[in-house]
Image (cartoon, rainbow, N blue to C red):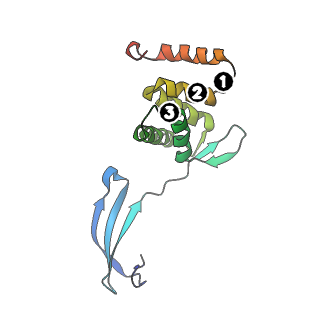
Amino acid sequence: MRCPECGQDDDHVVDSRPQPGGEAIRRRRECRACGGRFTTFERVERRPLLVRKRSGALVPFEPARVLEGMARAAKDRVERPLLERAAAEVERTLRDAGRREVTSEQVGLQVLARLRDLDEVTYVRYASVYKDFQRPEDFEEELSELRKELPPKQR
């Protein structure tokens, strides 16, 4: 690691600590040449997760796009931190499947599952775009399915 003060690459680690959540390790380093101290972070480099679109195109998975779609559907209904947590769960579930490639349908179904648990109106808003509702009956059918799946206290 090159020292940001003098540019030398002769340093040693003074202190290491895991970051909250265990996603990274913070290391305090000291340059042996000039004595300057600096901090580095070590993170696991994940293999990119790829999404196969309906058109057949293969694109990188973008958690920000998932969150953006959820936030649009949840406008004024669900707080951002809850959506961020749900979007992270979507990514975690897709990665835990152990595959390098997932379909856009798998992504959409994971989003719907999280939104169903958060807020029914948000779920229906998202479903109307994701499932391309064309008629009022499409909403009625989706609501009927939602009522079957939800426990009686949530209806």
Q: Amino acid at mark 1?
A: Phe
Contact (Cβ within 8 Å) of mark 1 with mark 2: yes
Residue nearer the viewer, 33 or 132: 132
Residue 96 circle label: none
- Residue positioned most to the left: 15
Q: Which residue is mark 2?
A: 127
Q: Which residue is mark 3?
A: 74
Q: Quadrant of the N terminus?
A: bottom left
Query: Residue at image x 58%, y 27%?
Result: 127
* Label 3: few (<14), some (14–19) or many (≥20) C-alpha neighbours in 10 Å: many
Quadrant in the picture for residue 152: top left
Left or right of 57, for residue 97: left
Which residue appears at 55% of the width and 24% of the height? 124
**Which quarter of the rendering shows the C terminus?**
top left
Q: How many marks?
A: 3
What secondary structure is marked by label 1? loop
Kind of residue at disc 3: Ala
Please give the residue where the numbered disc 1 appears in the rendered image: 133
The CA distance from mark 3 to mark 2 is: 12 Å
User: Would you call the spot at circle 2 few (<14 residues within 10 Å), some (14-19), or many (20 or more)?
Assistant: many
The secondary element bearing badge 2 is classed as helix
Look at label 2 and name its amino acid. Ala
